[in-house]
Amino acid sequence: MLPTTVVGSYAHPSWFYAAKELMEAGRFGPVDVEETFDDAVDRAILDQEEAGLDVISDGEMRRASFVWAFASRMTGLRDGGAPRKMGPMSLDMRNVQETTGPVGVPNGMGAVEEFAYASTRTTKPIKIPLPGPFALTTFIRPVDYYTDRTHLAEAFVPALNHEIRQLAAAGCKWIQLDEPATPGYAANDPHTAADIARLFNACIDGVTGVHFSLHICFGSFRKLPYAKKTYARYFPDLLEARADQFVLEYGTREMAEIEQWMSWAPDRELGAGIIDIRTHYCETPDDVAERVRKCLDHVPADKLFLTTDCGLRYVHRTLARQKITNLVAGVQQVRETL
Ligand SMILES: [Zn+2]
């Protein structure tokens, strides 16, 4: 009852930051690199197990950051530099890739290898998150060959479908696609909920026996959201997506719109984000319990999962660990009253 989980990415320990600096400086050999990433995954798994989460991730520790990690795996791109280089850090300070022709991910996305390793390190159920096709366009500007962002997103469907089929064959039972509420700084790309649903279904086409979730993300790069924080415009069109569960952010919005759930998606599971990953405030177990009860006023208990709003990548490790510990403690308070 009331399973707890995370969206995907986990905080990096200080030693991992230091180790990656040494890697970039060429001080690590391949054996050192592999050992370091394995250790980072082990630590992410251990923190989640110790917190008592029911379904865990590998922390996405092998991915440089959400979608940029995949740029090096893609073909058909050239580096277009960063749109802005001065002032406060934001998404537009990351380098943008420009299309030069058909894009592809010829050697896979690496998630199959991530699952293979993580599944040897825990007996807990593992969720594997993948960026959805629109998310993969976040750092790409359609220049040559593609006319718009939706056209470009469609080009990533074969690679995602292939990866998801392989994950399912390897025994992965829960796969999540993360899609941005708006792709990066692309305010001029009006993709719709219907587009997201159509491509989600194409990505999971032909795969059975897997629990599929769809996270709609307000953006969390350096804790900075980039989307209007409402899900009202996604329903009912998003219901076309054959997702078992929608993973939505409520913590950052003080639970706004939770009262809409039964009019939006009464037959689906809700992965309710109730831990705000964009604040240094650490929700207490009592805060968590209060939010869970608020969910239960509007969501059937057997359809409710509790999670962080988004990945914990930009939360410092000590705080991240406390947040997931308190998430479990608060949910447990409510379980005991049911
Ligand atoms: Zn998110």
Image (cartoon, grey):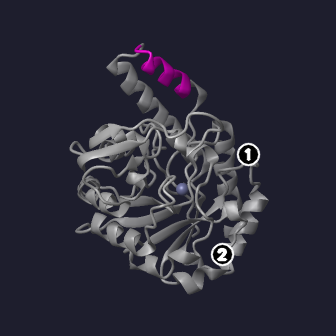
Classify the position of ligand 1 by quadrant: top left, top right, bottom left or bottom right: bottom right
Q: Which residue is mark 2?
A: 257
Which structural element holds mark 1? loop
Camera sees residue 332: no
Q: Which x, y percent locates residue 93?
A: 54, 39
Residue bounds of the magenta highlight: 16-26
Residue 334 located left or right of residue 183: right
Q: Residue furthest bottom?
A: 263
Q: Which x, y percent locates residue 54?
A: 53, 57
Q: In the image, what residue type sits under mark 1?
A: His
Q: CA distance from mark 1 to mark 2?
A: 23 Å
CB-based contact (under 8 Å), mark 1 and mark 2: no
Toward which corner of the image does residue 202 lie, by quadrant?
A: bottom left
Foreground residue among 102 and 83:
83
For the stretch drawn in magenta, the main secondary structure is: helix
Q: Which residue is mark 1?
A: 280
Where the C terminus falls, by quadrant? bottom right
Foreground residue among 289 and 191:
191
Q: Mark 1 vs mark 2: which is more N-terminal? A: 2
Where the N terminus falls, by quadrant? bottom right
Q: Is mark 2 within 8 Å of ligand 1?
A: no
Residue under the image location 55 percent in, 50 percent down: 311
- Would you place residue 180 above or below residue 196 in this image? above
Q: Which x, y percent locates residue 152?
A: 31, 57
Residue 212 located left or right of residue 282: left
Answer whether residue 88 is magenta in the image: no
Which disc is residue 65 wearing? none
